[in-house]
Amino acid sequence: MSMKIKLIAIFLLLIMIIFQSPIITYASDGQKNDRYVIYNENNEKIMEKSAVEVGDSFITQDFEEYEIYKIEGNEAYARKLSDIIISRSKNLNNEMTLNSHSLKSTICLYMTHNDESYTPTDGYDSVYGVGGIHDVAKELKSELESNGYNVVLDETLHIPHNSSAYSRSGQTATKLFNTYSPDALFDIHRDGVSKSYYYTNQNGEDLSKIRIVVGKSNPNYSKNYEFAKELFVSGNTMYPWLFSDIYSGSGHYNQALKDSCLLFEMGTYLIEKEYVYNSIPYLVDAIDLILGSEENNSADNGNSIDGNISDNNQTANEDSNTSSNSQNSNDTENNPSTNSTAWIWIVLSLAIISLIIAFIVFKNKKSKNTEKATRKK
């Protein structure tokens, strides 16, 4: 075997070792400094969030609206703005009959942060590429379809998990909107806070709460917010544990496309993925209450809906010019681990490989020169 072939073989072997290694995953011990605890004016803990800014607002499970006015270290403080008045005309209670309207809506699902995963179940909180969040989206798709909805799940990759991910996923969201004219468009995520904030046990069943996120930098914010509140109130009236909160952050989240564009935090990276699965039927009940009764033209919109858009091997092209500064600053809020650490390891590994190859080439040349010198003697 020639030296050239040997070098190629060594290089390929080392590359395989690197990319099979958990070095490119983002393992976390849950002690990251980007988790904030939010207190009310009485210094009572009311929320956890992985990234916050002064001016962010939220609605708690008690239907109270707050706004963050101060941040000190990893603690934030919020003042109460108002109580949310439950004004839906329907009689919302646990005995109510959910909609069984024959004409169901079309719902599109996608994932801006494809890498997000669940440490107890998946082994890592994030995996470069298709993470555990894809399994959650598939489960949601299946449950919605069981309830009669037309569902498109787009699994296009928007990696890496960096400040341009929402710009890339915006292309996917726009494509879904233009192709299928959906009645709702949901971006599926998982959060980066403690397990205790999301975990709940109801009647012996282990479950995960769900957070609704709305972007204030979006010109359609007020309508998205009203839709979020309607879903939140309806869901938590039926199942008081279901939604942990509605969080209105400074991001954009591609929600200008439609009033019913929302971002769901399906549990947190420290919770078992199975607990999230258990909560999905309850989420679908809440969605059904809002969308199931509304007549729409989704059944004859002229589009062929084939279920999953299997696009795992394609990454959406980056278009950073379409993202706002505030959106970019919040893009990494749900990942408790940093992508930069992983890339540093990759670059260092490649540098080491290059040094090894250079050393082998040098030794080979030196050996040949020694042989030539010997022959001359």
Image (cartoon, rainbow, N blue to C red):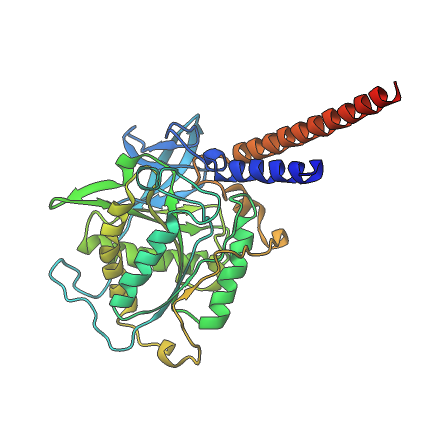
Image quadrant assignment for residue 35? top left
Image quadrant assignment for residue 99? bottom left
Q: Could you say where residue 199 lies in the image, as x and y percent from the top left?
A: 24, 40
Q: Is residue 50 visible?
A: yes
Left or right of 350 in this view: 253: left
Residue most toward the top? 377
Using the image as rendered, state which of residue 117 and residue 318 is in the foreground. Answer: 117
Left or right of 187 in this view: 82: left
Which residue corresponds to the image point at 73% horizontal and 30% vertical from the top-left? 361
Q: Could you say where residue 68 lies in the image, as x and y percent from the top left?
A: 40, 37
Left or right of 372 in this view: 258: left
Residue most toward the right? 376
Q: Could you say where residue 6 lies in the image, as x and y percent from the top left?
A: 65, 37
Using the image as rendered, state which of residue 68 and residue 117 is in the foreground. Answer: 117
Which residue corresponds to the image point at 48% horizontal and 39% vertical from the top-left? 20
Q: Quadrant of the C terminus?
A: top right
Count of numbered labels shown in the rendering: 0
**For residue 17, above or below residue 254:** above
Using the image as rendered, state which of residue 216 and residue 183 is in the foreground. Answer: 183
Q: Quadrant of the N terminus?
A: top right
Image quadrant assignment for residue 365? top right
Using the image as rendered, state which of residue 246 and residue 292 is in the foreground. Answer: 292
Left or right of 374 in this view: 279: left
Q: Could you say where residue 362 lies in the image, as x and y percent from the top left?
A: 74, 26
Q: Is residue 63 visible?
A: no
**For residue 238, above or below residue 74:** below
